[in-house]
Amino acid sequence: MNPPTDKKAILFGVPIDNLTLEETVGRVETMIREGGTHQHVVVNVDKIVKLQRDPELRNAVLSCDLINADGQPIVWASRLLQHPLKERVTGVDLFDSLVARCAEKGYHPYLLGARQEIVERVVEVLRQRHPTLKIAGYRNGYWQPAEEAEVVQGIKRTQPQMLFVAMGSPKKEIFLNKWKAELQTPFVMGVGGTFDVVAGLVKRAPRWMQKCGLEWLFRLIQEPRRMWRRYLVEDMAFFGLVLREWRAQRRS
């Protein structure tokens, strides 16, 4: 097996940054100091499967400046395919670390997404955890298409250093890819259901289940009606993708 490096690991056509959580936080700080706008995304089994058939999502992911692997199966696949990643970097863990860094360094984050009562609860929790944190602003994730440009301008006026968008995939990736140049926010990141976790509506799997790659099972048990098709039907295509890459590697 090749030793891990700081280079990108090309897996399923996606250049994944081979970074630890702490290294990722450091990279984000470098991006903020450099100026410009940088988009981050995490890829998991579901997103890898979706972007094979969704050109708009694929384009949004491939245009990102920083890509982490969120999901233990991605890390296992990287080892099988001889491009071993150092570790998984989950969106929830990265969000927590970046918010802590905001409080420490004086960065102002903006929170966008979820229902209004949920995002308000997230703001309360974060202020309790980090008394020095200054939040640039927050807003729920519901608006009409005609209102979207004004939502973007509202965020832009607050001049945050980081923008966290709690929407589903591919909506958040496409939204950020479309508007990041206009937003002029140094670092933008989709965080999916992270606000629900921070607000206490959804529990994370125990650490042992996370390490064993069983976080999906814990979530399936919590939300069987919503998640059964994704995990038990759609995501099964991932195994075919791994087999295809392994065979291609063997032939080469």
Image (tube, rainbow, N blue to C red):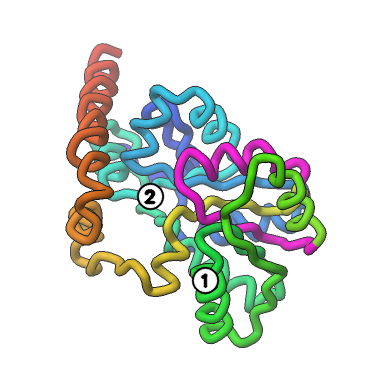
Image height of 193 relative to 41, above or below:
below
User: Residue 43, percent across and down?
Assistant: 41, 42
Residue 204 within the segment the image draws in magenta: no
Single out the residue that lies furthest toward the right. Answer: 157
User: Residue 183, percent across and down?
Assistant: 75, 48
In front here: 88 or 249?
88
Sort mark 1 into few (<14), some (14-19) or many (20+) by Cα contacts within 10 Å: few
Q: Is residue 213 visible to the viewer in this orientation of the structure?
A: no
Question: In the figure, is residue 5 to the left or right of 80?
Answer: right
Residue 175 within the segment the image draws in magenta: yes
Looking at the rendered structure, which numbered label has been put on residue 70? 2
Residue sitting at x 30%, y 45%: 75
In front here: 230 or 159?
230
Image height of 126 relative to 68, above or below:
below
The magenta span reads 158-182
Image height of 192 relative to 228, above or below:
below
Element class at badge 2: loop
User: Residue 86, percent across and down?
Assistant: 37, 50
The Cα atoms of the two marked residues, 1 and 2, are separated by 27 Å
Single out the residue that lies furthest toward the top. Answer: 251
Q: Quadrant of the N terminus?
A: top left
| Of the two numbered discs 1 and 2 in the rendering, the one whose residue sits closer to the viewer | 1
Q: Is residue 78 visible to the viewer in this orientation of the structure?
A: yes
Label located before the other in sequence (1 or 2): 2
Residue sitting at x 25%, y 36%: 235
Q: Amino acid at mark 2?
A: Asp
Element class at badge 1: helix
In front here: 79 or 31?
31
Residue sitting at x 48%, y 34%: 15
Q: Which residue is mark 1?
A: 117
Q: Amino acid at mark 1?
A: Glu
